Image: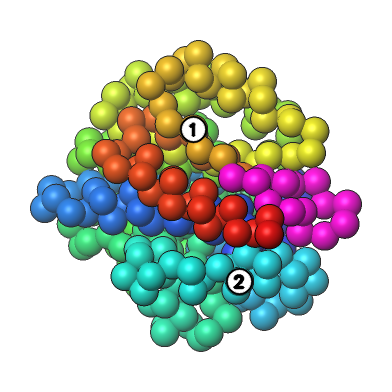
Amino acid sequence: MLSYQHLYHAGNLADVHKHALLAWMLDYLTRKDKPLSYLESHAGRGLYDLAAPEAVKTGEAAQGVERLARAFAPDHPYRRALDTTRARHGRRAYPGSPLIAATLLRATDTIHLAERHPREHAALAEAMLPYPARVHHADGFSRIRELTPPTPRRGLLLIDPSYETTADYDGMARFVAQIARKWNVGILALWYPILETPRHLGMVTALAAACPEALRHEVRFPPAREGHRMVGSGLFVVNPPWGLAEETTRLDVLFGTLAR
Ligand code: SAM
């Protein structure tokens, strides 16, 4: 069993990058009346307590969401999801991607979430109880292969692995290309870490060759603490919605302020 727990990292700068773009895309999709599907292969526990010892120990949320939340206007979908979650669960609560989706989507939309770790899956199932989401205790790669193309066909898949094994990097371009063929209208968003040693480069080169029209957005930031290897965050989006490029430019400005 792998040991990654997102509670140590929830609300860090990479989460702010990934969740802000995810929230923006979901909000964009809900501007049309038509229902949509939201799928996640690596869902995590959905709801995080930033006052928990694990989160306090790393201090990553303090440098991430606690520092940047107010840089988003109150009507930005990321702020809306954050504020709604805090109004319901307390001021140190943080919404993972499943809860961001559940908060922004409508009763007519369909949500499928896969999580393989038994404890994270149990916490996710509890966090999603108030919402009409289907929570799968399963390997996300195989479950997404089974679920695609989904009904309704409009929609978005978030792939957010923990990159604990080289398999997460090595098989990714093939997986994304396969899902893009099966679900040619789906928006496929893959998150990846940018480490000091650029482990992601081979994967991203293969992804760009397989999906040349995709949008790739990366931000850089100072490491969370001395010796911490993550120095940036990337999102690779197949079939990016119209206007996403402008939103990434706004994030470039925001993350640019961190270097100063
Ligand atoms: N997407 C979440 C968010 O933004 O709130 C965070 C997900 S976290 C980075 C990655 C999660 O994937 C962990 O909870 C881990 O247990 C889970 N995981 C790892 N391998 C998996 C697999 N093959 N299938 C499904 N879940 C997996």
Badge 1: residue crowd in 10 Å (few <14, some 14–19, many ≥20):
some
Foreground pick, 142 / 209: 209
Q: What's the residue at 68%, 55% (across, down)?
A: 259
Is residue 10 visible in the rendered image? The answer is no
Q: Given the current orientation, which residue lies at the most extreme top position?
A: 209
Residue at which label 1 appears? 216
Q: What's the residue at 51%, 38% (across, down)?
A: 217
* Label drawn at residue 20: none
Is residue 196 visible in the rendered image? The answer is yes
> Does 182 appear in magenta?
no
How far is the residue under mark 2 from the one under mark 1?
A: 25 Å
Is residue 183 shown left or right of residue 119? left
Foreground pick, 160 / 130: 160
Location of residue 73 in the rendering, given as x and y in whole percent from the top left corner: 38, 70
Location of residue 15 in the rendering, given as x and y in whole percent from the top left corner: 57, 56
Foreground pick, 54 / 26: 26
Is residue 67 shown left or right of residue 36? right
As shown in the figure, which amino acid type bears the numbered disc 1? Arg
Q: What's the residue at 26%, 29% (across, down)?
A: 185
| Residue range highlighted in magenta | 219-232
Chain-order first, disc 2 or disc 1 = 2
The mark total stands at 2
SS majority, magenta: loop
* Label drawn at residue 67: 2
Q: Is residue 134 above or below residue 141?
A: below
SS label for mark 2:
helix
Location of residue 99 in the rendering, given as x and y in whole percent from the top left corner: 43, 64
As shown in the figure, which amino acid type bears the numbered disc 2? Arg
SS label for mark 1:
strand
